[in-house]
Amino acid sequence: MTLAVLGAAAVAAALGVISARNPVHCVLWLIAHLAALAAIFLTLSAEFLALIQILVNAGAVIVLFLFVVSLLGPSKEAEGLLARRGEVWPALMAGVVFLGALLVMGLHQAPAPGSVPSGFGSVPSVGNALFGPQLLPFELTALALLVAIVSVVTLAGRSRQP
Amino acid sequence: MSAYVALSAVLFAVGGVGLLVRRDPLVMIMSIEIMWNAASLLLVAAARFYGVMAGQALVFIVITLAAADVAMGLAIVMHIARRGESVDVDALKELKG
């Protein structure tokens, strides 16, 4: 029941993101989507990840989006740059086919729900997994962040000299 | 578990349709964000149902990479906008700086 309500909210907010004409409204829908997902994370006993989702995604990433929206200003094409009419139906059909493929692949092997171990999803357990078995992916994430920082600084610095 | 898989698939498909339908690169990046979130929802659900913490640790990494991805995409959008070009992806013909 909880999942139905929260999932409907998440899907509705995602539809709002892709259909709102004003980019600021898209950002607001995205905040609602991220909040609904954080609530779903809570129902899956992932408290720490729900908190991180709110802090990083709904906080830092949204601020980044809002900064760029306000720096760009209202676009000359005030319609929020929706696709031309002839492109919407093929995209919807592709989405339906894609969804069908995902469901066929994903739904036929669903395990029975197990009992929750104590401390599952708490900060110590996430930290133990992150710095224990998952240490290599964690370190590679640091490398990816370094690459992202260098590329962003390069892009932002180069445009200052025309 | 199958309800979570279905929800994740629906969100991923919505993000993919948004990526195809919109021409504003900002909203396209937001659609990619929705797709990242669908993937992390699937990972969290799998971690819960299989009782393995590795899924949640990977979601931590996914959130970090999504943030880096958004930052790079927005830097490219800003770069294009500062050159005085339209930020319509159909009007962009070259990626050369």
Image (tube, rainbow, N blue to C red):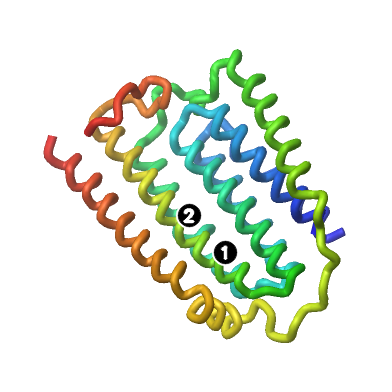
Crowd class of label 2 (few under 14; some 14 to 19; many from 20; radius 10 Å): many
Q: Assess whether mark 2 and mark 1 are in contact (beta carbons under 8 angstroms).
A: no
Q: Chain of mark 2?
A: B
Q: Residue A128, located in which quarter of the rendered image?
A: bottom right
Circle 1 is placed at which residue position? B59
Query: How far is mark 1 from mark 2, CA to CA?
Result: 10 Å
A159 over B65 or under it: above or below: above
Q: Is A153 in front, or is B9?
A: B9
Q: Is residue A127 left or right of residue B81?
A: right
Circle 2 is placed at which residue position? B66
Instruction: Report if residue A27 is visible in the image.
Output: yes
The quarter of the rendered structure image containing the C terminus of chain A is top left
Q: Chain of mark 1?
A: B
Q: Position of residue A105 (x, y in %)?
A: 74, 45
Are the numbered discs 1 and 2 placed on the same chain, yes or no? Answer: yes
Q: Residue at x 24, y 31 (%)?
A: B96
Amino acid tagged 1? Val
Q: Residue at x 47, y 24 (%)?
A: A78
Q: Is B22 in front, or is B95?
A: B95
Amino acid tagged 2? Ala
Q: Residue A6, located in which quarter of the rendered image?
A: bottom right
The quarter of the rendered structure image containing the N terminus of chain A is bottom right
Q: Position of residue A73 (x, y in %)?
A: 37, 35
Q: Position of residue A32 (x, y in %)?
A: 63, 52
Q: Position of residue A107 (x, y in %)?
A: 80, 49
Answer with mark 1 or mark 2, whichever residue precedes in sequence. Answer: 1
Instruction: Report if residue A5 is visible in the image.
Output: no
Crowd class of label 1 (few under 14; some 14 to 19; many from 20; radius 10 Å): many
Q: Is residue B85 left or right of residue A119?
A: left
